[in-house]
Amino acid sequence: MLSSQLQHSPQDKKHAQLRNNWLEEEITALFGLPFNDLIHQAHTTHRRYFDANEIQLSTLLNIKSGGCPEDCAYCPQSLRYSTDIEESPLMEVEQVINSAKAARQNGATRFCMGAAWRSPKEKDFKKVLEMVEAVKSLGLESCATLGMLTQEQADRLKASGLDYYNHNLDTSPEYYKHIISTREYEDRLNTLSHVRKSGLNVCCGGIIGMGENVADRAKLLQTLANLEKHPESVPINMLVRVEGTPLGQTDAIAPLEVVKTIAVARIMMPSSYLRLSAGRNEMTEELQALCFYAGANSVFFGERLLTTDNPQQEKDLELFGRLGIKLKT
Ligand code: SAM
Ligand code: DTB
Ligand code: SF4
């Protein structure tokens, strides 16, 4: 046996294959493959890194709803748009604990707390740290999405026991200006860099179906995969078109484009959890099954996302049962 073979375990070998130098033309070529070739490659890649019949469940809780000063064109929680979301104060720690207990009871392994903030203020932030500690003590993985973070805030979240921080790039650098004007793409990258440096796991993805083209989807995935380290978790949200938001009347994305985006993401970031995130309530079970085949291996589980509906838990469990998919413990 060669000495180089002796030094590397199969796991090392797999990870040595992770790339962060993807070229746009390579990604465009993946999107241009015949559908069967693309999902075959994605599924084969998926099996090299994961049990193809296992799914990870995260449950979301909106700990601070509405009244957000940002102008994200997709978001019902922005105070700039007239949706029926009322502003609510930051939840009490006790209430968060009760929701987290229920999530654990129902089979979720991760509990994700979302707040409609541009960035957290000190008084609220302290309370969130308490929530993180409480969730952790229940034996759940914890995740938070609170907007932009300084390095100090990221470090304090890590010290309080947080496992993941979710902060999405949302779309390509080029399309971004059509979606948000109140913060720059660069601001998002800076927050991601603070999160990475703090030692937290990174949960970062985007939204498809906002009127972007395939090149924008390719560039979003390129930006994600070419980060110094791939995000451990990549949520792919399909736009939930909420009346009253600027994107409320956008044409629905073609279902097979969702599958193709998942497949390309799986090929580019083979060891990351890929979450089929917002939009499942409008997807058929067949479309979801194809997404799982193409490499999606995580979902949000629970009847609500932040402000919009998600499939009923019993329906999800029934679907996983029929597909022979077991829950990650
Ligand atoms: N306010 C924080 C922020 O924006 O960073 C955290 C919460 S925010 C609601 C989290 C993410 O939810 C957004 O970045 C976006 O990707 C996703 N999201 C919000 N509204 C959505 C919608 N209508 N459809 C799909 N995804 C949505
Ligand atoms: C993510 O990527 N998707 C979740 C979570 N991270 C915070 C949010 C989806 C929100 C969908 C619209 C709503 O329910 O308000
Ligand atoms: Fe605010 Fe987040 Fe909604 Fe943007 S996505 S408006 S930052 S809650």
Image (tube, rainbow, N blue to C red):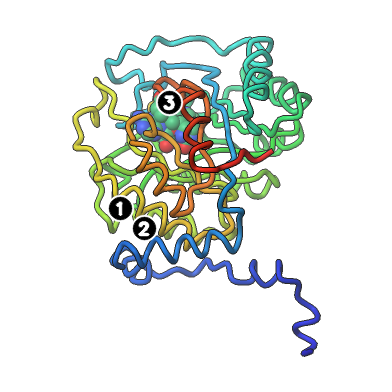
Residue 268, labelled with which disc?
none
Q: For this rendering, which residue is in front, 263 or 210?
A: 263
User: Could you tell which of marks 2 and 1 lies nearer the N-terminus?
Assistant: 1
Residue 179 position, x and y percent, is 30, 38
User: Could you tell which of marks 3 and 2 lies nearer the N-terminus?
Assistant: 2
Which residue has dot 2 on it?
219
Looking at the rendered structure, the secondary structure element under dot 1 is: loop
Residue 107 position, x and y percent, is 64, 28
Single out the mark in the foreground, 1 or 3.
3
Relative vertical location of residue 204 with respect to residue 312 in this rendering, above or below:
below
In the image, what residue occupies the spot 70% across and 47% down?
199
In the image, what residue occupies the spot 32% across and 66% down?
28
The amino acid beneath tag 1 is Glu
Which residue has dot 3 on it?
310
Looking at the rendered structure, the secondary structure element under dot 2 is: helix
User: Could you tell which of marks 1 and 3 lies nearer the N-terminus?
Assistant: 1
Quarter of the image where the N terminus is located: bottom right
